[in-house]
């Protein structure tokens, strides 16, 4: 449920001395939104520490949480590669520390550092696979069947989420989640 990419995090640590000012540190508080849906992306981020949630807000105001991302995961790479506005917003779930680089610097690293390019490709492939599995599960199982699986994963990762976050991740309302929790 919480994605991490420790190989990418280690590579960034190793790149820091040579990168100089090209990679900076940014910090955000829990609950703070730092990427906004449908806006121009200026920086690509790699999570040094903390937990974030990328989410899509629909026209009716409902939010759908795509996934939860932790250490070593990247934010803004899809938009930087495609040259498009942001697909989703990103909120800090816990206090978060990020490595930040400009879009041009990110593209330069992709072109000149094969190990960086390979890890970004793996990250993108992993996200596609994880999204496919999540969508398949939501099609094949009822929410009542999915909720215990989700609760088991959360317990294993020792992280508690709000009901709003759980409902947003499952793509249901908090009211529906409460009914599921009561066993109705």
Image (spheres, rainbow, N blue to C red):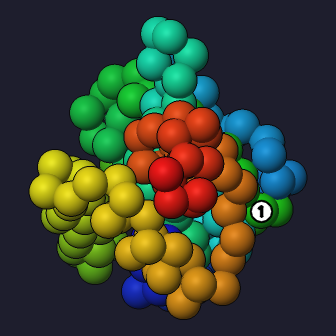
64 lies above or below 165: above
Could you tell me residue 94's position as x and y percent? 77, 62
Image coords of residue 158 (percent x, y): 66, 85
Q: Secondary structure at mark 1?
A: loop
Nearest the camera: 7 or 153?
153
Q: Which residue is mark 1?
A: 94
Q: Residue at x 47, y 10 (%)?
A: 59
Q: Is residue 3 above or below residue 38?
A: below
Query: Residue drawn at (67%, 77%), measured in percent from left and top?
Result: 159
Question: In this view of the protein, which residue sits in the foreground, 58 or 13?
Answer: 58
15 lies above or below 100: below
Is 155 on the left or on the right of 28, as rendered? left
- The answer to whether 121 is drawn above or below residue 92 in the figure is below
Residue 12 visible, this orientation? no
Quarter of the figure with residue 131? bottom left
**Quarter of image, res 49:** bottom right
Measuring 56% from the left and 16% from the top, which residue is drawn there?
Answer: 61
The residue sitting at the right extreme is: 29
Question: Left or right: 92 with respect to 105?
Answer: right
The answer, for residue 161, to whether it is visible in the render is yes
Nearest to the observer: residue 77 or residue 34:
34
**Residue 52 x %, y %:** 62, 57
């Amino acid at each position: 449920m919480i994605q991490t990419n420790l190989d990418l995090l280690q590579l960034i640590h190793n790149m820091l001395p040579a990168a100089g000012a090209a990679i900076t540190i940014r910090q955000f508080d829990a609950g703070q939104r730092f990427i906004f849906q449908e806006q121009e992306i200026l920086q690509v981020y790699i999570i040094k520490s903390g937990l974030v949630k990328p989410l899509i807000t629909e026209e009716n105001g409902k939010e759908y949480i795509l996934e939860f991302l932790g250490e070593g995961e990247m934010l803004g790479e899809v938009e930087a590669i495609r040259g498009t506005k942001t697909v989703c917003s990103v909120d800090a779930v816990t206090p978060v520390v990020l490595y930040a680089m400009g879009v041009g610097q990110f593209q330069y690293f992709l072109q000149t550092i094969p190990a960086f390019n390979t890890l970004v490709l793996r990250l993108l492939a992993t996200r596609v696979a994880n999204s496919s599995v999540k969508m398949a599960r939501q099609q094949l199982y009822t929410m009542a069947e999915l909720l215990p699986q989700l609760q088991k994963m959360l317990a294993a990762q020792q992280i508690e989420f709000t009901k709003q976050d759980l409902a947003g991740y499952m793509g249901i309302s908090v009211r529906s989640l409460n009914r599921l929790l009561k066993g109705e």
